[in-house]
Image: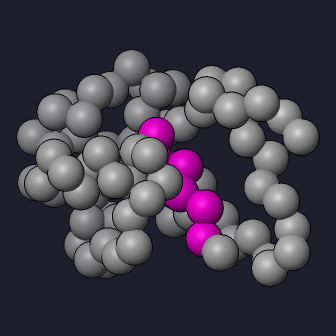
Amino acid sequence: MIQCHVGRLMARDGLRVADVARATGLNRSTVTALARGRATRIELPHVEALCGLLGCTVGDLFEYIADGQQPVLTRSEGERHP
């Protein structure tokens, strides 16, 4: 699975969905889905815009988690550690 860290990066920078949507041109619902880790696809120009806004690399935005491995969620993402 691919884990999306957009929400964590937004929180780090104090950005709201509306801020990211306005700065990147992404639809608010797309930004919300990314922030909640529920997005199923994204266009490469949007990945580039997010990296530019958040000052990060593609590897900071997304992480590959092999099947059978549990992702480690942080408390800032609203989840408990396993």
Q: Residue at x 53, y 57 (%)?
A: 4
**Residue 44 location, quadrant:** bottom left
User: Is any part of residue 55 visible from this angle?
Assistant: no
Q: Residue at x 42, y 34 (%)?
A: 10
Q: Which residues are magenta?
A: 2-7
65 horizontally vs 57: left or right = right
15 horizontally vs 6: left or right = left
Residue 14 lies, in percent from the top left, at: 39, 20
- Residue 3 on the magenta segment: yes
Residue 77 lies, in percent from the top left, at: 60, 32
Q: How is the image coloured?
A: one colour
Q: Is residue 76 above or below residue 1?
A: above
The quadrant in which the C terminus is found is top right
Q: Is residue 81 above or below residue 49?
A: above
Task: Report the front residue among 54 and 42.
Answer: 42
Residue 80 lies, in percent from the top left, at: 77, 30
User: Is any part of residue 63 visible from this angle?
Assistant: yes
40 horizontally vs 80: left or right = left
**Residue 64 location, quadrant:** bottom right
Residue 18 lies, in percent from the top left, at: 16, 33
Q: Residue at x 24, y 57 (%)?
A: 30
Task: Report the front residue among 3 and 79.
Answer: 79
